[in-house]
Image (spheres, rainbow, N blue to C red):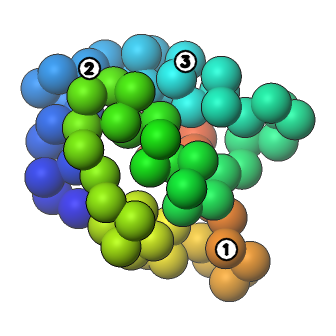
Amino acid sequence: MKDIARFISEKSSVEAVRNVLSAIDEKITKLLDAEDFRWGLIDLGYNLNKNEAEQVVACFDKSGSGVFNYEDILS
């Protein structure tokens, strides 16, 4: 997770990450599952594998529903 946070802070602005993730969020719920989050970071140039994406989601998924509010990690 530290690698992901470092990548975002070094290579992308918070606003760029927000724009990519909100573009994936077609229903405008601000909720993403691991696969959507993974592809969002891949779009930003970070090659995140499925296991890593699942770990990030698990870390922020407070309800155990398999999704998380991406605004939680961007604030």
Is 3 on the left-hand or right-hand side of 4?
left
Is 60 on the left-hand or right-hand side of 44?
right
Residue 9: image x %, image y %? 19, 30
Residue 14: image x %, image y %? 38, 23
Q: Which mark is residue 12?
A: 2
Is 4 on the left-hand or right-hand side of 65?
left
Q: What type is the residue that disc 1 sits on? A: Gly
Q: Residues within 10 Å of mark 3 (few under 14, many from 20)?
A: few
Residue 30 to residue 63: above or below: above
Q: Which residue is mark 3?
A: 19
Element assignment for label 2: loop
Residue 31: image x %, image y %? 71, 50
Q: Choose the circle earlier in sequence order: 3 or 2.
A: 2
Residue at x 16% of width, y 37% of height:
7
Q: Which mark is residue 66?
A: 1
Q: What type is the residue that disc 3 sits on? A: Asn
Residue 65: image x %, image y %? 74, 77
| Cβ–Cβ under 8 Å for marks 1 and 3 | no
